Amino acid sequence: MCGIVGYIGGKRAIDFLLDGLTKLEYRGYDSAGVAVNCGDNIFVEKAVGRLDSLKQKLKNNLPLGNIGIGHTRWATHGRPSDTNAHPHSDCHGKFFVVHNGIIENYLKLKQDLTAKGHKFISDTDTEVVAHLLEESYHGDFLLAVRDVISKIEGSYSLVFMSKENPDVLICAKQDNPLVVGIGENENFVASDIPAIISYTRKTYILNDGEIAIVQKDSVQFVNRQGLPINKKIFNVTWNAAAAEKGGYEHFMLKEIHEQPKAVRNTISPHIKNNSIHFDELNWNADFLKNIDKIYIVACGTAYHAGLVGKFYIEKLVRKLVEVDLASEFRYRAPIVDENTLVIVVSQSGETSDTLAALKESKRLGAKTLAVTNVVGSSIAREAEFVIHTAAGPEIAVASTKAYTTQLILMFMLALYMAQISKTVSDSDAERLIEQLKKIPAQISETLSDVEPIKTFAQIYGFNDDVFYIGRSLDYCVALEGALKLKEISYIHAEAYAAGELKHGTLALIVEGVPVIALATQKSVYEKTLSNIKEVKARDAIVIGIAAEGDTSLSNYLDHVIFVPETDELLIPLLAVVPLQLLAYYAAITRGCDVDKPRNLAKSVTVE
């Protein structure tokens, strides 16, 4: 959600700005812009729409300056337009700023500044920051930035550029990610590492309340009071090729096919001597005994992973688990105390709602555990405990490998807790671990034949409505399958617990409506089969997801997609793969922009 880049050095800034913004397109945006200090003037260009529109405007007019900032905007205040696009400036074009986040008190600040004679041209909250800087500047750039930060409320990553200070960029961070990349006689700023990975592996990751003073040959850090901060360099361990398509037509398809590797890499560090280990947790029986309640808090796909996690923990550990949407959690006075464990799940580790829920949980005294894919992310730093998925960079907006690696971690975490609590026998634990080890190869097997799924997508991809049904863990997976279809194909899709159909939803089942029925859970198989018969009796087209060896389901369905047989606790990792592929090929059938679906962003850093 929104992308920031900045450059200062001896080279032409615009080259990095455009390349960096291209690398951040996966975050989702609706306009883009750049500002470059060319000495005598600040060159500014903006364009609504895709980055290509901006590049077209710049085609015959590339600025030559070697310090600049750029931005891709996802509209929050004001519609997408050239005027509302970043960067924004003050009345006289002396200061320019790019911003991710929301300035919550911008209306009051705007009223005060307007009364002082400032003229605003956009509808954004960000423009207030540029005018505040103009008001606060009296010759000391850093002091003026600190004054601005003391007056604004909300979340932000900000990068400031001054015409009168052409040798420095100043950055500030609160609740939104920002990194500084270290080069040779040049330095880089970005809201995410993929923008700079082709240029440097050495980065500084800003924490909340920190300010970076970035020059071409130095980077200094201070806090809001102006006191110096010593920071360690964070070396990025993955390379630029990991963020490229690798011959696949879309990042999403590449990431679907990367799931066997991602799952294997997530599993391997935690299996030792036929048991699950989390050295980063080092919990014991007394720790778990004192936990009365567990919350899993997340958004979107991570929330769906949390629903599966609830099932795992309650089944294996026999602890009460509640799953909550992060956007709702802190507004309902959650019952949280020192005997509560709050598990927050976020691919990026920067999800604004999830981060806020984490901070509220800490304030209430809870023990906190982060499950995230990004080392050094805000959520990873804020939580008391953290465990990492090993999905690698996920570029497509619709999450795939992040979801499966979250499921794997949830399963291993539950089994780890069960081992400590002695709620699972050693023999059962060993059996589950042996099944777990086979999952990467079984995902590969599931991916080996996609032609039937392509055919289903071509046949049913133009339907306006699709329903997903399942019971037990199948219902959790159905929710994720429906979300994938909605996200990238724009088909109206809904998932229901199959037993709930007769409580209203059957009214929507008419002749020819596609229904995706998951029937992988042996414990409720006969119940699910009964629900499938109910929709078939209304002449729905039913596509089933079943385990290999199921010889009866085909008698009741129009089509069946089989996945390898495994323990019913682990089969969600396999059942979700054809649902991901079905969504992908449906989007292709409909001509949708798979990697950058409309109105959505990869990392949601505003509330």
Image (spheres, rainbow, N blue to C red):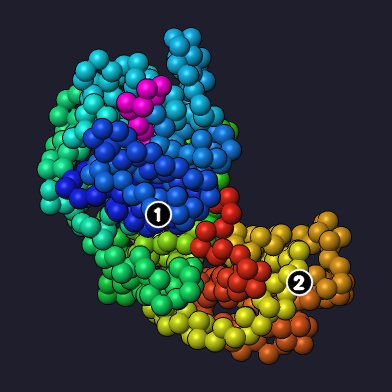
Q: Is residue 461 above or below residue 287?
A: below
**108 vs 386: above or below:** above
- For badge 2, the amino acid type reads Pro
Q: Nearer the viewer, mark 1 or mark 2?
A: 1
Report the residue at 35% width, 31% height from top. 96
Amino acid type of the residue that numbered disc 1 sits on in the rendered structure: Lys
Residue count near mark 2 (Cα–Cα under 10 Å), binned few <14, some 14–19, many ≥20? many
**Which of 249 and 605 lies nearest the eye of the viewer?**
249
Is residue 296 found left or right of 359 in the rendered image? Answer: right
- Does residue 205 appear in this view? no
Q: Nearer the viewer, residue 261 or 23?
A: 23
601 relative to 533, above or below: above
User: Where residue 318 sits: x, y (%)?
Assistant: 50, 57
The secondary element bearing badge 1 is classed as loop
Q: Nearer the viewer, residue 508 or 306?
A: 508
Q: Which residue is mark 2?
A: 514
Mark 1 crowd level (few <14, some 14–19, many ≥20, 10 Å Cα):
few
Dividing the picture into quadrants, the one containing residue 454 is bottom right
Q: CA distance from mark 1 to mark 2?
A: 47 Å
Find residue 364 and report its horizontal and vertical position in percent: 42, 32
Q: Look at mark 1 in the image and give the residue it sits on.
A: 59
- The one nearer the camera, 211 or 318, is 211
Please give the label number shown on residue 392. none
Give the secondary structure at mark 2: strand
Left or right, 477 with respect to 290, comes to: right
Pointer 1 or 2: first along the chain: 1
In the image, taking residue 222 as reference, residue 549 lies left or right, namely right
Range shown magenta: 90-98
Residue 381 in the image: state x and y as whole percent: 30, 44
Q: Position of residue 400 (x, y in %)?
A: 49, 65
Question: Magenta span has 94?
Answer: yes
